[in-house]
Image (cartoon, rainbow, N blue to C red):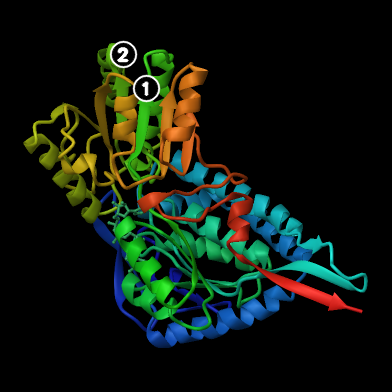
Amino acid sequence: MDDITMDDVMLLIDGEWRKGRGDLIPVVNPATGRTAFHITGASDADLDDALAAVRRGFLQWKGTSAFERSKVLRRAAELLRERADEIARILVTEQGKPLAEAKGEIAFSADTIEWFAEEGRRTYGRVIPSRAANSELIAYREPVGPVAAFVPWNFPILQAVQKLSPAFAAGCSVVLKAPEDTPACCAALAQVFLDAGAPGGLLQLVYGVPSRISEYLIPHPVIRKVSFTGSTQVGKNIAAMAGRYLKRVTLELGGHSPTIVFDDADIDNTIKSIAGVKFRNAGQVCVSPTRILVQDRSYERFIDGFVSATRAIKVGDGLDPSTTMGPLVSQRRLDAIERLVQDAVRHGATVETGGKRIGNEGFFYEPTVMTNVPAGAQAMNEEPFGPIALIAPFKDLDEVLAEANRLDYGLAAYAYTNSSQTIQLLLRSVESGMIAINSQQVSFPEAPFGGMKDSGYGSESGTEAMESYLNTKLVHVTR
Ligand code: NAD
């Protein structure tokens, strides 16, 4: 990464890479804690240029056939696969995750682009039986217009792709504000779309002070749709602004996933299933299993097994092939995790393993398991977004449902049980946008991904994602 220069990460406006005229922003390698390169943020004049280009791009792309759009998306998926090794290394060096995870993110992103390439050819309208023999009623589907998309740093490529693919497939153009922590991998993704034949106006890539950019783009009359992934707090501000200017919005916000383990589950496999994903991306995952609730009889056995699995994790630089957990993305996240663990301990929590920063170079933190964390501790209430597993016992279904639904979050939930009756009750009672039974899998290109309550609204992925980029126009033809 040290050979990346400022010129490598520029704004993409109207198909041309250019230096922004805004602030200079340092980008830090999380494995060293040192500034690796700088990016230039967008000035108001740059944003004006991006808005003019995205408007032109929309008119051109809207007029391109669904068949041609699909070809560009399919080619982009192929190119992303071809460049996976190179882009994965960029992702690791600016984000921190292990190389195998970075490659997995890119492979999943390519599958997502490809799925929407096909789906874009199936955005059917509807012919409605008319009241008169000489007339026709048609529900016609049209792209909603230019989109402002805001993507965070934890899965920067995938989250960009989950916005760009349905938007492009539906016929929309996009101004993408990519994360300032991880700009170079998003620039590499933008180059993939350019090389796949995307017209210059289709995708504008900008960086800068996030609030300044969202406050400039969202009210602007060119923008017709907003999509944001990030924290609940920021999401509420974005929703309020989108509401004031009547822009459609999709919000994928934070979570604090209840993960319920019943006595009748296969406990050894359950430990493997949860431990296998808990520390993925150093826990910086919105659907990470965070509140692990284990039924009384299995509680001690679960803790023993989970703590052993946690101790087997090898923390290190993501580029080292033996690393299974990398650093946190930033000093900000390191400080937040230290604060959450110290607060839990002050409230009487037991640290079963971990609980400390590793070294003083880079943003490494030990994979941490805590028990006896009282409901009043911050970690039990705010999204931990780091390598912290909180494990608590429960007696029965009523007690565990009360805990599962206690928070305002409602993103993902997980349960492990062999009882079909328990499964039925959970499906109806857990307040979450997604629930997986006996696995940790809730993300698929073809299925809706999203939350309820304070975790946001609207879906990314699946046909539901396409819907959010389409308007329905009634056409009434009388002959
Ligand atoms: P943060 O709130 O500064 O940033 C989160 C993301 O939102 C970043 O990508 C940032 O660029 C963007 N952002 C912030 N303010 C914005 C604004 N006014 N307009 C547009 N974009 C804006 O904090 P952080 O330290 O990066 O993360 C803090 C919390 O955010 C985490 O603890 C987690 O709860 C949440 N988060 C959630 C996701 C997710 O996948 N849902 C991803 C990243 C962060």
Label 2 environment density (alpha carbons within 10 Å; few <14, some 14–19, many ≥20): some
Task: Say which mark, if any, is on residue 471.
Answer: none
Q: Quadrant of residue 243?
A: bottom left
Q: Percent position (x, y) of residue 328?
A: 28, 47
User: What's the amino acid at mark 2?
Assistant: Ser
Label 1 environment density (alpha carbons within 10 Å; few <14, some 14–19, many ≥20): many
Q: Nearer the viewer, residue 45 or 168?
A: 168
Do we see residue 440 in this rendering? no
User: Considering only vertical position in the picture, is 101 above or below 198?
Assistant: above
Q: Nearer the viewer, residue 362 or 293?
A: 293
Q: Percent position (x, y) of residue 358?
A: 18, 39
The residue carrying mark 1 is 261
Quadrant location, ligand no. 1: bottom left
**Left or right relative to 355: residue 72:** right
The residue carrying mark 2 is 298
Quadrant where the image shows the N terminus: bottom left
In 3D space, how far apart are the residues under numbered discs 1 and 2 (Cα atoms)? 8 Å
Q: Percent position (x, y) of residue 128?
A: 80, 62
Q: Percent position (x, y) of residue 164?
A: 57, 62
User: Considering only vertical position in the picture, is 319 above or below 38?
Assistant: above
Q: Residue furthest bottom?
A: 45
Q: Residue at x 66, y 50 (%)?
A: 115
